[in-house]
Amino acid sequence: MGTRKNPKEAAKSIDCFRCGLCCTRYQPRLTPREVERISKHLALPAEDFIARYAQVTAIGYLLRQSAKGCVFLIWEDGQTTCGIYRVRPKACRDWTASLSQPECQQGLAKKKTRID
């Protein structure tokens, strides 16, 4: 029989595995301020940023997804990075990699499979 893990221990943050699962499953909401900040970083007028990278919904703007996840998700050698990391939305900044996150559990399993 396995040992039970302390819930507080499981919720501790961990280093990101850069598997990209969180970026493929969620569409972060963008505030008007975030639209301005990201569009400025990309040297685009806000209207162009919205047309290219945002989805307009009844609840506001969502960051657009491609077939491989977030439009700003960059895949390199089986790992991912964020193309707008310095100005990413609050929803992305607030994400905490943790073994209590199903995406991180799956990312760890995926990484372990590649190592074995």
Image (cartoon, rainbow, N blue to C red):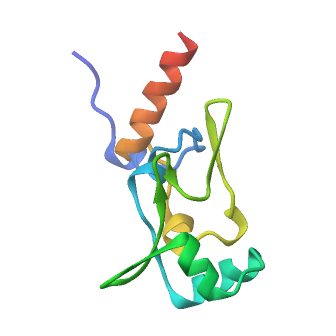
Q: Residue at x 57, y 15 (%)?
A: 115
Residue 53 picture location, percent across and down? 55, 70
16 or 58: which is nearer to us? 58
Q: Is residue 61 left or right of residue 32?
A: left
41 or 89: which is nearer to us? 41
Q: Residue at x 53, y 90 (%)?
A: 32
85 or 4: which is nearer to us? 85
Q: Is residue 53 left or right of residue 105?
A: right
Q: Residue at x 68, y 30 (%)?
A: 77
Q: How many marks?
A: 0
Q: Is residue 73 left or right of residue 102?
A: right
The N terminus lies in quadrant: top left
Location of residue 31 with respect to 7 vertically, above or below: below
Q: Tell which residue pokes out farthest to the left in this image.
A: 1
Q: Tell which residue pokes out farthest to the top in this image.
A: 116
Q: Residue 61: which quarter of the image?
A: bottom left
Q: Is residue 76 left or right of residue 91?
A: right
Q: Residue 18: which quarter of the image?
A: top right
Location of residue 71 with respect to 68 vertically, above or below: below
18 or 25: which is nearer to us? 25
Q: Residue at x 72, y 81 (%)?
A: 44
Residue 113 picture location, percent across and down? 48, 17
Location of residue 14 with respect to 89 vertically, above or below: above
